[in-house]
């Protein structure tokens, strides 16, 4: 009897303690929520257990990345109830109904587990859904789709961006009302010679933006055309090279000449040629580097068809004309610029203005510029003091000389201290005057290199 009594007592105690040792419950509220892409929300999970234990709380679902935490470890006392806040941020662009399961599992008894489910219905509230781009010649057509489950009106900013992130052009489309999928179209001007690289279109509105990329590949293409124009007196050959690519390119000019031809206007330097062959021909080759995208370079030469006598006559006429031009050049106003070294970095700049013709010239003005790599000594003038002013290109000196009598010469000078070692190029001086026919004339001197 005593054994039976002990057995019954133990059985009763185990049956009474069993619910308290193993009971576990998980409840989530709310069980369903409707959220837009970009929204943040909170679910509350209530965990109840009868016995002291450790529980692993994990959440399963397609988009666990929306949850601020998907694994939690709880230490619970006997008969304790704990509430857990589950933060949710809806990201991406997928819409629909998404179920999630939260499950609590005992560490001491893995078979003891309990869970609950909740769902999130996701919709779009004025979200940039897609961007399509079509490049046609000098235009870039952009179509973006704005998706919104409920009617909404917002301004939309569309930006064209360079490979290094600089905004090249932007357009604001005002008051776009979206309900469902609403297309928004715009057009950008796009340089047909745009440099290669990865460009992008960025579309943004309040609480939404999207960015798509497109590549501009390297295009290397030179179009060469040759045109011949024949007249009774000459045959003119015109070479045209156009860079229709989007990177600088080099062009090579090739030309075959014959020793018996009278050629003017060589497309290439005739000294850069092969030796004359048995037929009296030479192949001449030259190159022009760094032809810019969209740039066209033209080379022309002519083969004269004059008879020998006419060629000689023409040569005589050319000599006479050259002499006339030489006389004209020698008798027109002239300006020369020179320099003399006065120390390690100190130089004396002299400008000579001459009026060799037999007529007076009026309103003579001379301008010169001191390089930014040199410093003007504004206290040392041996002639007329100029007006001095600073410009982005350096220091400008201006002399107003008034009228100059026939065969009059003026000397203008100033001193500079160079700020760098080695040779320094000084720009040419410029002169403006009014001739005897009241016409404005311009000329300039040669460049000067100070060492």
Image: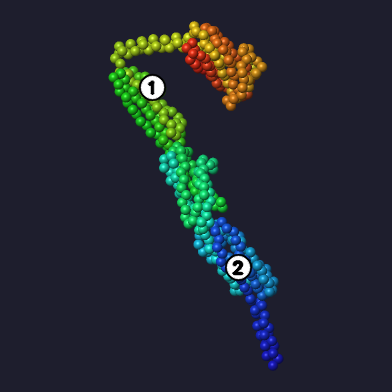
Question: Does residue 136 show up?
Answer: yes
Tell me how the rendering is colored. rainbow
Q: Helix, strand or loop at disc 1?
A: loop
Residue 69 placement, left or right of 214: right
Identity of the residue drawn at 53% across and 12% down: 362
Whichever of labels 2 and 1 marks the residue nearer the N terminus, that label is 2
Frontmost residue, 271 versus 407: 407
Q: Helix, strand or loop at disc 2?
A: strand
140 vs 123: above or below? above
Tell me the quarter of the image containing the C terminus. top right
Identity of the residue drawn at 38% across and 21% down: 265
Residue furthest to the right in view is: 2
Residue 300, image x, y percentages:
37, 24
Identity of the residue drawn at 50% across and 50% down: 176
Camera-near label (2 vs 1) is 2
- Write down the quadrant of residue 10 in the picture: bottom right
Residue 29: assigned label? 2
- Give neighbour class at mark 2: few <14, some 14-19, many 20+ (Cα, 10 Å): some
Tell me the quarter of the image containing the N terminus. bottom right
Frontmost residue, 336 versus 180: 180
Residue 180, image x, y percentages:
48, 57
Residue highlighted by disc 1:
266
Question: Does residue 345 show up?
Answer: no
Spatial distance from mark 2 to mark 1, Cα to Cα? 90 Å
Q: How many marks?
A: 2
- Give neighbour class at mark 1: few <14, some 14-19, many 20+ (Cα, 10 Å): some
Identity of the residue drawn at 68% across and 70% down: 76
Residue 116, image x, y percentages:
58, 70
């Amino acid at each position: 009897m005593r054994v039976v009594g002990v057995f019954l007592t133990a059985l009763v105690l185990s049956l009474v303690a069993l619910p308290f040792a193993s009971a576990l419950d998980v409840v989530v509220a709310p069980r369903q929520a409707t959220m837009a892409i970009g929204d943040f929300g909170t679910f509350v999970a209530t965990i109840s257990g009868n016995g002291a234990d450790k529980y692993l709380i994990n959440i399963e679902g397609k988009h666990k990345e929306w949850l601020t935490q998907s694994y939690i470890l709880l230490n619970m006392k006997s008969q304790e109830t704990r509430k857990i806040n589950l933060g949710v941020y809806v990201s991406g662009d997928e819409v629909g109904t998404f179920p999630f399961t939260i499950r609590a599992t005992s560490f001491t008894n893995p078979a003891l587990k309990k869970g609950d489910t909740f769902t999130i219905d996701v919709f779009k509230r004025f979200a940039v859904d897609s961007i399509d781009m079509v490049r046609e010649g000098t235009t870039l057509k952009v179509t973006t789709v704005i998706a919104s489950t409920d009617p909404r009106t917002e301004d939309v900013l569309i930006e064209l961006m360079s490979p290094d992130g600089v905004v090249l052009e932007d357009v604001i489309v005002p008051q776009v009302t979206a309900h469902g999928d609403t297309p928004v179209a715009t057009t950008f001007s796009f340089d047909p010679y745009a440099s290669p690289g990865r460009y992008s279109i960025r579309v943004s509105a309040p609480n939404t933006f999207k960015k798509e990329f497109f590549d501009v590949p390297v295009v290397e293409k030179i179009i060469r055309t040759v045109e011949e124009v024949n007249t009774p007196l000459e045959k003119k050959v015109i070479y045209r090279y156009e860079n229709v690519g989007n990177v600088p390119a080099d062009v090579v000019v090739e030309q075959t000449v014959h020793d018996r031809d009278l050629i003017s206007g060589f497309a290439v330097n005739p000294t850069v040629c092969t030796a004359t062959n048995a037929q009296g021909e030479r192949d001449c080759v030259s190159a022009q580097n760094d032809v810019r995208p969209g740039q066209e370079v033209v080379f022309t030469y002519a083969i004269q068809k004059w008879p020998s006598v006419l060629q000689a006559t023409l040569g005589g006429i050319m000599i006479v004309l050259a002499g006339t031009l030489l006389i004209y050049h020698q008798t027109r106003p002239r300006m020369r610029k020179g320099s003399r070294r006065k120390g390690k970095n100190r130089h004396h700049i002299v400008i000579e203005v001459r009026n060799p013709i037999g007529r007076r010239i009026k309103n003579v003005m001379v301008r010169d510029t001191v390089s930014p790599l040199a410093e003007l000594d504004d206290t040392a003038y041996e002639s007329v003091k100029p007006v001095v002013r600073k410009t982005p290109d350096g220091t400008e000196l201006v002399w107003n000389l008034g009228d100059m009598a026939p065969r009059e010469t003026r000397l203008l000078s100033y001193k500079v201290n160079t700020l760098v070692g080695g040779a320094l190029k000084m720009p040419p001086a410029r002169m403006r005057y009014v001739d005897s026919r009241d016409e404005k004339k311009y000329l300039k001197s040669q460049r000067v290199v100070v060492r």
